Amino acid sequence: MSLLVLISRILHVGLGVFWAGTMFFMVFLLEPSVRSVGPEGGRVMQALQKRGFMNIMPTAAAITILSGVFLYWRIWAGFGMEGLTTPFGMALTVGGIASLVAFGQGVFIMRPATLRAGKLGASLANTPDAGERDDIIARIAGLKSRSRTHARWVVFWLVFAVLAMAVARYV
């Protein structure tokens, strides 16, 4: 095994575990806990954003996908495209597609909604008009709901991708 393949596998598996595990933690533990404490929970999410969480996650996901694409290419360059029709090839392909769907939903739908909700939440302190505050709060609630829904879908696709790739050698 070449050093480049070894490094790619380490990046793919290590960052894939981080990406999927963090999303699972966020969806099933952190977000419900933050929501249950009310407005104070927003401070936790703002602190995560200040630490770069909303940039770290898509970066880890992108590196996971890029290293996976490299590994995928290395496999089929040696065996030819007919390998894609094997159960092993189909499992890797389906897992890869699921991870691309998760990435797309996370980066293009969930992340912008979360960032917009955070900006609106920060603007509440400078909004003295009660009617305008209520409008902002309603928009934040809608954005959070959208983000929460898509975060659950991201977790679904990531679990699907992880399971497909984990069993690929055995199907």
Image (tube, rainbow, N blue to C red):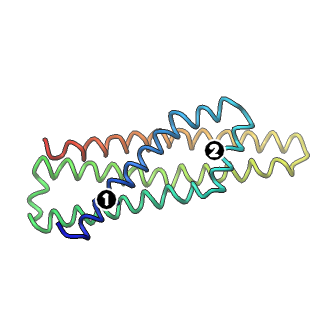
Coordinates of residue 76 in the picture (x, y in percent): 15, 63
Label 2 crowd bin: few (<14), some (14–19), many (20+), radius 10 Å = many
Q: Secondary structure at mark 2?
A: helix
In this rendering, the count of numbered labels is: 2
The quarter in which the N terminus is drawn is: bottom left
Coordinates of residue 123 in the picture (x, y in percent): 79, 52
**Picture quadrant of residue 44:** top right
Q: Which residue is mark 1?
A: 10
* Left/right of residue 69 with respect to residue 134 in the rendered view: left
Q: Residue at x 88, y 40 (%)?
A: 130
The quarter in which the C terminus is drawn is: top left
Would you say the residues marked 1 and 2 are in contact, meaning their CB atoms lie under 8 Å apart?
Answer: no
Coordinates of residue 117 in the picture (x, y in percent): 67, 48
Q: Which residue is mark 2?
A: 143
**Picture quadrant of residue 51:** bottom right
Q: Residue at x 71, y 53 (%)?
A: 119
Alpha carbon distance from label 1 to label 2? 35 Å
Q: Secondary structure at mark 1?
A: helix
